[in-house]
Amino acid sequence: MVTTRHQFASPLQLLALASAGIILLPLGYVTAQALSADPVVWQRLWTTRIPELLFNTVSLAASVAVVTLILGVSTAWLITRVEIPGRRLWEGALVLPLAMPTYVLAYVYSYLLGFGGPAEYLWQLAAGPQARIFSPHSFWGATLVMALDTFPFVYLLSRSALLSMNVSFEEVARASGVSRMATLWRVTLPLMRPSIAAGLALVILYVVSDFGAVSLLRYQTLTYAVFQQMTGRSDNTAASILSLLLVVIALIFLITERWFRQRSRFYQTTGRYRAPERHRYGRLGSFAVISYLGLIVGAAFALPTILLIQWSLSAEALATINNRFFGFVWNSAILAAGASTGGVLIGLPLAYLACRRPTLLNLSCLQAAYAGYALPGPVAALAVLILFTTIAPVFYGSVLILIVAYVIHFLPAGLQSLEPALQQLSPNLEEVSRTLGLGMRDTWRRVTLPLVRNGFVVAWVLMFLQTMKELPATLLLRPVGFDTLAIRVWMEASEEYFQLAAPSALLIVVLSLPALALLVSKDWRAA
Amino acid sequence: METTLEGNLFTPASSVLELRTVSCAYEPGRPAVQGISFSAREGEILCLLGPSGCGKTTILRAIAGFEPVRSGQLFLSGQLVSSPDVTVPTENRRVGMVFQEYALFPHLRVQDNIAFGLRHLVRSERAARVQEMLRLIGLEGFERRYPHELSGGQQQRVALARALVQHPVVLLLDEPFSNLDPDMAGRMRQELHDLLRRTKTTTVLVTHDHDEAFAMADRIAVLNQGRLEQFDTPEMTYHMPATPFVADFVGQADFVPGTVSHGMVHTELGEFPDTIECKDGTAVVVMIRPDDIHLVPTKGALARVLSRQFRGSENLYTVSLPSGQIVHSSQGSTSIYQAGTTVEVRVLATHTVLFRREDSTG
């Protein structure tokens, strides 16, 4: 039907389609490469390596999901619904682990829990000189590290859901005679489900495509295997087969999560917001809560940071801080800023269209954006490289390729924040704007954008954090000599030069903090 | 695509809004509204009345331009704005809309909310208009507040001001009083009515509350399951309902069965003139309102009071007739009869409303 009512279709939709296209091209490359491989190679991989890798990857993802679910939802609930001394501080503290990359946490814990490390020492004091605790280079080590590092995703999104939840739902339940505990279980948690699901999706994707932690902890996941294939043997075929498998797993999960979230779309009521009543616990209860929170923050952030500071102040470490070092700093910052800006600019139209006009096409474009995150760093990097060398070889060896790889890889992180922000924006507001004579473009500028600004900012910040810490794509795509802080940490940590790696690691953490502060200070009610 | 425009280019100049056999559907094959025709004169207040799901909000949204029209035509100020082939975008229609939850921009102050659509004016002119509106709605001094700092009634007034400041062709209100408590709603209704009269704004109001419709509207369109059942003044709708649904929806109604014989309808409550000219022997029902029935307590009478509902200004009695038929009667506030009192039932209707038996809801 050709009518004037579709005046809005073209520019935004074209942009969305183009973005989706760019993201799908690498996936296309991987698929083509894998499917054109010799069946013998498939056979070999399928019988030897794949079962083990699959099992490792899936079990790790599952265990991390369970742990982060518990940690994230419990902390979010405690922060929003319980009167805790120093609550504001705790709100900030619980987000701090996001500033700590998985490989930094991994290398700290491989020292703490490792052979001859302090944990073993303490254990041996209690259990005798031959006693061993579990090795960090194991399933449980990897679970611990990944969970401590990623639970803030679940925490943030759950907290956001709890803060914007209309208190009357819980009040209705309690008026119907349902106990507090049962209200939590039957009303509050189901209402939080989309946010929790979104957080868990992010966590699982993170785990499945993580490279830094699993490589330092020597835990064989599919992603680690892909990297090894590519650098060890320059064998792209085997790498792409493994990648295809990885992508299929992630895609299955993505589609399930998307379907799940589509089933519960809530619009925030624009009626007056009433802050939920906070429980007050006695002295013992408050102490228990504080200890719980303190334990988590300590393990995930405080203890590692203290260790990093200690190491950085050692003589060897101090000697590495020179101009070269500051060069790495600059590199990291530019890349991250470029990627986040590009990312939110691409992500906003995709999310907006999928939210306001959920046609199959728009939803598919959005799904395509999420698919990018299912491409592990090494594969996205390689595919982008091939793409540019075929289409625009002039950019070969430049920073632009790396930024494109970052955007493709990390766009979903930004979308996870943009989407809920848009879903909570009532369409009535845009409709009113149109009755007052504003066209779609002006409505966007004066109504939609200001109101999703918080979600926008959060998306930018989340993407900035992710790209600052990125490792495998950077390892593969960076221009010669263009090292980032992440590269330095990894290089030194893999050789167990704990002290030398410390200044870079510490700096990554410190540089992530202002961005985090921004995140926490913004009023999440609007996002 | 054939059009029927050529034959119907003439539209009465005085009608600001006109719908001609408009149908809308959210999915093909499941119409939300069908064959709706009505019009509004300048300065008139129209009410779309009906239960949830009857399509009244759909019609409102079609007038605003948010919903496309699958068949029929929609005219604003004599211009065709919606038809199956053409939909003029909302921003070009100059309709003012107030949503049920007001949809005030949370990131803007009151003055910026009201001035939102006035970008084409110079700043001084804009400020003057905002002040004028604030005076009109009685909220001077509230310019710099944010929506969350206002009460429900104040928010509604700001939403109204925002819609009226652009002198809209028609003002659309979607259940404007459903979020307010009854006292507040009653007062707001009066104020809104005065305001609309003063500004001579053509208004279409959607509600499910018939009291509200009676209080506010010059004419009421009663809708049921997507169809227009009656379009009339409040008095006519109440006293001469066109269908049993309308009769029952706008007030308490009892349907007493009877048979036609020689131009009269014979019922348990007496005889009534046959106003719909049926053949002898046709089964009909007579619609009776509680205010038409008078009770006289009489020993040994056959009808009996079942219960009494005190309503402040009146008592509503439920009475059972000898046949088992239940009727209601409205008596004075101080006439109190106990349950079980035998009464004589007298009908004092000035006119008769009849429906054929198969139409009735009973």
Image (cartoon, coloured by chain):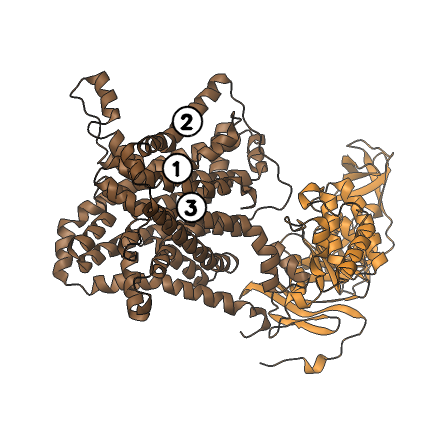
Chain colours: A brown, B orange
Q: Choose the circle earlier in sequence order: 1 or 3.
A: 1
Which residue is at 82% across, 47% downward?
B138
Question: Residue A3, can we see it?
Answer: yes
In the picture of the structure, the residue carrying the numbered disc 1 is A97
- Report in which chain the residue with disc 3 lies: A
Label 2 sits on a secondary structure element that is: helix
Q: In this view, which residue lies farthest toward the bottom?
A: B6
- Report in which chain the residue with disc 1 lies: A
Which residue is at 22% across, 51% downward?
A227
Residue A197 x %, y %: 41, 44
As rendered, which of B48 and B16 lies closer to the eye?
A: B16
As rendered, which of A342 and A495 lies closer to the eye?
A: A495
Left or right: B62 in relation to B303: left
Label 1 sits on a secondary structure element that is: helix
**Residue A105 sits in quarter:** top left
Front label number (1 vs 3): 1
Q: Specify the amino acid type for callout 3.
A: Ala
**Residue A104 sits in quarter:** top left
- Report in which chain the residue with disc 2 lies: A
